[in-house]
Amino acid sequence: MKKILIPFIILTVVTMNSCALYKHYERPDISFVDSLYNKIPTANNYESIASLSWKELFADTLLQNMIEIGLKNNTDLEIARLKVEQAEATLQSSKLAFFPNAAVTAQVSTNGSYSLVPNASWEIDAFGRLHNTKKGSEAALAATEAFQQAVQTQLIATIANSYYTLLMLDEQLEISKRTLNTWEENIRTLSALKRAGKTNEAAVLQAKANKVNVEASILTLNKQISEQENSLAALLGLVPQVFERNDLSQQVFPDTLLMGLPLSSLVNRPDVRQAEYKLVEAYYATNVARSYFYPNITLSGSAGWSGVIGDPGDWIFNAVGSLMQPIFNQGKNKARVKISEAQRQEALLNFKQTLLDAGTEANNALVSWQTARKRLDSDKLQIMYLKGAVYNTQLLMKNGQATYIEVLTAQKNLLQAELTESSDKYQEIQSVITLYHALGGGLE
């Protein structure tokens, strides 16, 4: 009886002394997050652009179809899904460690004797080694799921950016083609004026040079469109092809962008969640390392029959509790704890830096959006003025008060202003996408 009670007495004592190893992870002080936004309008009710699903933000149905295809076919996202499956299997393995190990030993000798002995052993988790291993596996799984979400949100943002880049290039190509027609008309007009003695060869040559310049731009734009379509096809897991798409002018986005409170919005980002789960995993790994200073407690037992074939035999039963205390591994155990502590500090620093980077990205995206909107207002005014300048220089030229070179210059400036407007429109859209992603949107 005493032999049976001793292991349980030891178990009770050591369990009372091991509470510290069961302490759960607590989030470190990250109050600095609330000051990460710089002059950014926030929504105190936590409603922000990040609360929109990607289908709500990207209303273009053709883009939505592309994103759906990408979510199904993209190889990086599929790899991330497989990593989640591996983490799930690891967690399942750590849970099974709490159950006894069972086996059956069967033996028959030549003289007819036999034995059939099922046996089992069970490690008592008195010092939290199994518990902390399981908690670490849970954190690892959560980190892997966050990584998958990060890959997904990045994929959505990249597909959207690629699509809107194509729309911008399409618009610039259309502007260039219209301008090419204008230069061709200019050349015909200048040639007629030259024959009438109202202008000279220099004006004709200048117009032809401008026409050749626009033709070269059209070739470059067609090349860029082809390359962009190929890149988009690779993202979607498709062979290179021409994609159907809408116009840049048809795209609609919110006029006002609100951001939730910094802590709630930034911590929602998948990469921030992944960094924190890595910290949680490192925390429990440190607890596991500390548990090696304590003994292993194992209960084992066996029960079965032994006898001669044809005879029921005798009942065999044995139960024992064992305690193995590490003696000569103190140096190794100390090194293990030191390594895990350093890894935990590294994970903590990475978590805080990820938050800082997230705040910087959100600030930069909003400033970029605000700047693009202001530039668009300026672009519209500039285009309006330049259209007036083209019209007036044409009138002045007819009255002999301006040269055709002035008309050509005004038309050239108008072309550049229209190209700049399309680029700024794309920059506005890209800033919305970046801000949406920076605030942790796009999970749904």
Image (cartoon, helix red, strand yellow):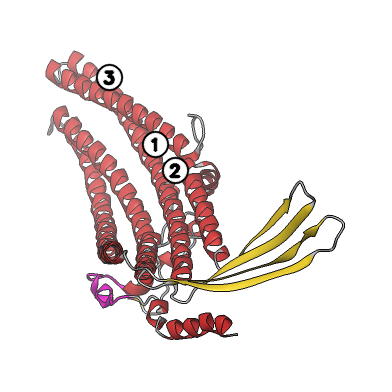
Residue 346: percent from left, percent from top: 26, 62
* Residue marked by disc 3: 188
Question: Residue at the spot x=17%, y=18% of the render?
Answer: 205
Question: Residue at the spot x=27%, y=59% of the render?
Answer: 361
Q: Is residue 117 visible?
A: yes
Residue 252: percent from left, percent from top: 43, 55
Q: Is residue 32 magenta?
A: yes
Q: Is residue 98 left or right of residue 178?
A: right
- Give the vertical position of 38 relative to 402 (above or below): below
The answer to whether mark 1 and mark 2 are in CB contact below 8 A is: yes
- For the residue marked with disc 1, what is the amino acid? Asp
Residue 263: percent from left, percent from top: 34, 73
* Mark toward the start of the polypeptide (1 vs 3): 1
Quote the CA–CA distance across marks 2 and 3: 32 Å
* Residue marked by disc 1: 170
Quarter holding residue 371: bottom left
Local SS, label 1? helix
* Mark toward the start of the polypeptide (2 vs 3): 3
* Residue marked by disc 2: 247
Q: What segment carries the magenta color?
A: 28-42
Q: Which residue is at the front of the view, 274 or 252?
A: 274
